[in-house]
Amino acid sequence: MPLRAIHGDADLLAFNYDMVGWISLKAAYKDMAIAMPCCGQAAVPKISKLGNFFFAHAVRGDCSSAPESQEHIFLKSLIAKAAKRAGWTVTTEWPGTTPNGERWVADVFCQKGAIKVAIEVQLSYQTTEELERRNLNYRESGVRVAWIVSGEKFKDAYLCPCNEIPLFRLKQFHAGEEPLVREFHVLLSEFTVGILRKRLKWKKRRGNMTFTISKISAGNARAG
């Protein structure tokens, strides 16, 4: 369930719409030939049970893209809207390729000038080897990445967040409720604005190579 569809040479981004605009799109889409970015098949604008706008396949067919949960769509929408408020150009489900030909698709891709940042939402468990592989793909592509993960699935012993693998755990949340980033006790949208406005600092501890994270307060995250 992506937040992006293709209309000719343009992207349609669900998080850019208000309710009036989305209802208008739902009324007109059959005459617009909008397509899914994953496979080029016809796309249908819909509204999830959590109230988020998204695009779905008119007919699933043989598309190999994995389905996303409503919670995943909800969090991607929050992040994309926050990144846009922070002044970045934002696209979801953005595809890229490493210099070695490894393909990746960013949940939320943010760009400002030459700076590129991918924000990945990972609610289902994956091995440390897989996360490190994906993290390396971004680094080799010149893209900085931040991982937003489930605190229930990714325990403290999984990986220690660091400058090389910035991994941040969400506190448990109910469907439709904006979660808090556990390390900072700040809402996800505020945290997104904070990291894109360079409010997040990594400080090396004396005597070893681990890193600590300076606090982002809600007030700082909102600051311009």
Image (cartoon, rainbow, N blue to C red):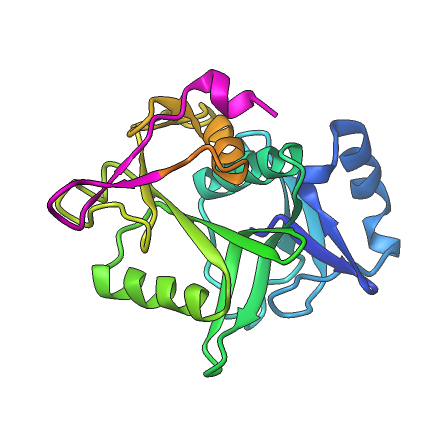
Side of 161 relative to 57 (left or right):
left
Q: Residue at x 54, y 32 (%)?
A: 193
Side of 190 relative to 7 (left or right):
left
Above or below, 42 relative to 90: below
* Residue stretch in magenta: 202-224
Give the quadrant of residue 60. Answer: bottom right
Give the quadrant of residue 156. Answer: top left
Which image quarter is the C terminus in?
top right
Q: Position of residue 47 (x, y in %)?
A: 63, 37
Q: Position of residue 137 (x, y in %)?
A: 41, 69
Q: Nearer the viewer, residue 161 or 78?
A: 161
Q: Residue at x 47, y 26 (%)?
A: 176
Above or below, 58 relative to 24: below
Q: Residue at x 26, y 57 (%)?
A: 126
Side of 15 relative to 162 (left or right):
right
Side of 79 relative to 150 (left or right):
right
Q: Nearer the viewer, residue 117 or 81?
A: 117
Residue 106 painted magenta: no
Q: Position of residue 53 (x, y in %)?
A: 64, 38
